[in-house]
Image (cartoon, rainbow, N blue to C red):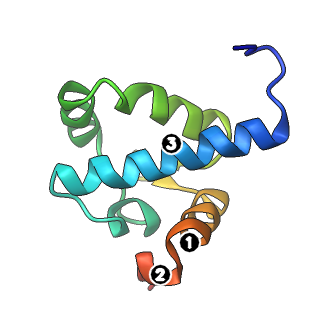
Amino acid sequence: MNHSHPSHSGMQRSLRQCLSHMAAMLYRHGHVLETVTVSHRGLDRQALKTLGAATSDWAPCQTILENSQAATWNDQQRLVLTGLGRELLFDMFGEGAADCA
């Protein structure tokens, strides 16, 4: 697989895969999508460490999400989805996937 210049659609595809993986991993470990879609919530470093220890898929996914600007760190140093990440997530799962209060 060529990683030097991912096509936009290839990047979108892996981003979507990561988002759906992330959603599944969150649910599996007792989190809800709102944890990452509500900007003042987010996953703290302890939660990320726990997820990373529980599944080897988490870290590479988190890297892709951050590198593509689909996820970022909020003021409380918690990982949350950006507008782009939320948009893709809602695009895949429907607006009802997370209440954007």
Number of residues whose C-alpha sits closer than 10 Å to that of mark 3, classed few (under 14), some (14–19) or many (20 or more):
many
Which badge, 3 or 1, is on the more N-terminal residue? 3
Residue drawn at (75%, 36%) of the image: 10
Number of residues whose C-alpha sits closer than 10 Å to that of mark 2, classed few (under 14), some (14–19) or many (20 or more):
few
Which badge, 2 or 1, is on the more N-terminal residue? 1
Q: Is residue 21 left or right of residue 2?
A: left
Q: Residue 68 placed where, x, y %?
A: 68, 39
Q: Is residue 92 left or right of residue 45?
A: right
Circle 1 is placed at which residue position?
90
The type of residue carrying mark 2 is Cys
Mark 2 and mark 1 in contact? Answer it, CB < 8 Å. Answer: yes
Q: Say which quarter of the image contains residue 85.
A: bottom right
Circle 2 is placed at which residue position?
100
Residue drawn at (73%, 16%) of the image: 3
Residue drawn at (42%, 76%) of the image: 97
Q: Residue 18 carries which label?
A: 3
Q: In this view, does 30 lie to the left or right of 23?
A: left
Mark 3 and mark 1 in contact? Answer it, CB < 8 Å. Answer: no
Q: Say which quarter of the image contains residue 49.
A: top left
Q: Real-space Cα distance between discs 3 and 1?
A: 14 Å
Residue drawn at (80%, 14%) of the image: 4
In the rendered view, would you say 96 is above or below 92? below
SS at mark 2? loop
Q: Residue 34 placed where, x, y %?
A: 36, 69
In the rendered view, would you say 99 is above or below 55? below
The type of residue carrying mark 3 is Cys
In the rendered view, would you say 62 is above or below 88? above
The image quadrant where one finds the C terminus is bottom left
